[in-house]
Amino acid sequence: MRERVLALVLVSAAVPVLGCGSQSPAPSASEPTPPEEYVEAVQELLVPPARLASLATERSRPRPEADPPSQSEVDGIVMVARRELAELRAQRLDDPALRRQRDALAGAYHATISRMERVGRDLVQDDRAALRRNLPTLFSSMRGLSSAVSPR
């Protein structure tokens, strides 16, 4: 439940930045990214850490109901996070405030990926003691994402 609330908080913080977007074709390399697509990219960025945090929260319980995830599942989540980060960094934004925000978010997200890798390793090894130590740092990093997208 805690991870769902955290994920909702992160998404809620991201959406008001510019408003809800609509699906539109990807701009060419020479065209700036529309603000709506930036918002969509920010929302998509939040999915991988929330997914991993959900898996980790389940495994950290005294009697987890699910088996630990496979290495390929964890690797897939981290790979999606890295791809989303690269796509966010590649966006061409005309608004200087959005560029600063994107750069702050990219830096915070890079740190989040590092924590995701640590938690993912703990999950695959089913090391619940390490998971209990490292999961709070992932949650803290995820809260930092919310701060990074907050208007300044």
Image (cartoon, grey):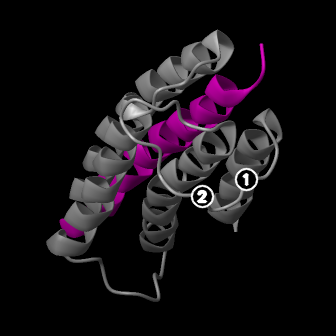
Q: Residue 21 carries which label?
A: 1
- Local secondary structure at mark 1: loop
Q: Quadrant of the N terminus?
A: bottom right
Q: What is the spatial separation of the Cα atoms under label 1 and label 2, in whole angstroms?
A: 9 Å
Regarding residue 126, the answer to whether it shows in the image is no
The residue pinned by badge 2 equals 24
Q: Residue 132 carries which label?
A: none
Q: Is residue 25 above or below residue 152?
A: below
For the residues bearing labels 1 and 2, Cβ distance under 8 angstroms:
yes
Q: What residue type is labelled 2?
A: Ser
Magenta residues, as a range?
Answer: 124-152
Quarter of the figure with residue 17: top right
Q: Residue at x 63, y 21 (%)?
A: 98
Task: Specify few, some or many for label 1: CA neighbours under 10 Å numbering under 14, 14-19, or 20 or more.
Answer: some
Q: Which residue is drawn at 28% across and 77% down?
A: 69
User: Would you say 82 lies left or right of 65 here?
Assistant: left
User: Would you say 22 lies left or right of 125 here?
Assistant: right
Q: Which of 144 and 92 is in front in this view?
A: 92
Point out residue 85 in the picture as x, y percentages from the top left corner: 37, 40
Q: What residue type is labelled 1?
A: Gly
Asked if the stretch drawn in magenta spans residue 53, the answer is: no
Dominant secondary structure, magenta: helix
- Local secondary structure at mark 2: loop
Q: In which quarter of the image is the C terminus?
A: top right
Q: Is residue 13 above or below residue 81?
A: above
Of labels 1 and 2, the one closer to you: 2
Q: In this view, does 33 lie above or below 71?
A: above
Asked if the stretch drawn in magenta spans residue 150, the answer is: yes
Quarter of the figure with residue 55: bottom left
Point out residue 110 in the picture as x, y percentages from the top left corner: 36, 31
